[in-house]
Amino acid sequence: MSTDLKLKALIVDDELPARKELGFLLSAIPEVEVVGEAATAPEALKLMATLDYSVIFLDVEMPGMNGIELARILQQHARQPYVIFITAYEEYAVQAFEVNAVDYLLKPFDEKRLGRAIDKVVRLAQQKEALAPAGSTAQAQPEPASERLGRIPAEKLGKTYLIDENEVCYAYTEGDMVYLKTRTDKYMLRFTLKDLESRLPARKFFRTHRCYLVNLERVQQIVPFFNGTYTLIMDDNKNSEVPVSRNQAKKLRRLLGI
């Protein structure tokens, strides 16, 4: 990012003390300049009509239009700002993922956690600036959610967890359901395997089969199987076996140089 470029921030929260506390924390972060506050979504939209904000810190539970609904509207803006949700409610994490939030901070949070969220925005802004043509003021296309959060919203026993993509061993379909497997746990997903594939970095996640998507960094062994196919032994607590179809086996060999 250019040294003279700051992220213009808007804080949207119906509680004045919450806005002031966040503003105080952000005042210590040199990359951010808070240039607006709003107590409601309609008020935020009016402010956005007069100024292009780089990042919006957005509460979820607000009177009238809530933060998720506002974020959906922001997705239609030509100059879409980055969105960081600031909320006391865990249950909106999946919806935040769906509207391409950069991060999802649960109140109360500390300066370190806020700093990590800002780092993500700075990194994305740097990438956007680097990709923009010289002299261009056009906004780059919004980054896919996988490049923003780096975490996957998944459910277990009625609770939503944000799983770091590096912890994912593989994902698979079973009937009409999609599941995600980490080293020790199994979670349910609310989107398709194809959607998940589009949200994850292609450099390390590979579709081995129409029903399986694997993290190549979590593969322990590649075992030749019948008629040019393979079986992958995964690095989880069960050493799970994942099939590689014949067509995908050819792609996998090229990818790994084997």
Image (cartoon, rainbow, N blue to C red):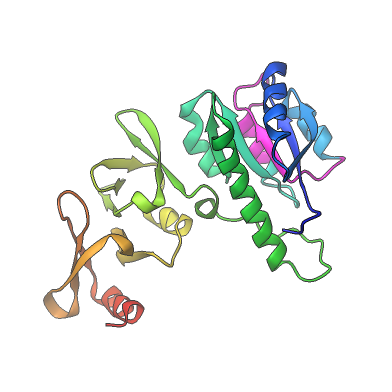
Instruction: Please check the rendered image and state whether residue 101 is part of the magenta-colored stretch, yes or no.
Output: no
The image shows residue 155 at horizontal and vertical percentages of 35, 36
Image: magenta residue range: 50-73
Residue 211 against residue 105 in the figure, above or below: below
Furthest residue toward left: 226
The image shows residue 187 at horizontal and vertical percentages of 30, 41
**Quadrant assignment, res 247:** bottom left
Quadrant that contains the N terminus: bottom right
The image shows residue 63 at horizontal and vertical percentages of 67, 18
Residue at left 23%, top 69%?
A: 244
Residue 74 against residue 158 in the figure, above or below: below
**Quadrant assignment, res 209:** bottom left
**Quadrant assignment, res 71:** top right
- The answer to whether residue 142 is seen in the rendering is no
Residue 179 against residue 244 in the figure, above or below: above
Q: Nearer the viewer, residue 42 or 200?
A: 200
- Left or right side of 22 for 97: left
Residue at left 55%, top 41%?
A: 103
- The answer to whether residue 198 is seen in the rendering is yes
Quadrant that contains the C terminus: bottom left
- Left or right side of 52 for 149: left
Q: Nearer the viewer, residue 73 or 23?
A: 23
Q: What is the tally of numbered marks visible in this picture?
A: 0
Residue at left 73%, top 43%?
A: 30
- Left or right side of 59 for 198: left
Residue at left 45%, top 46%?
A: 151
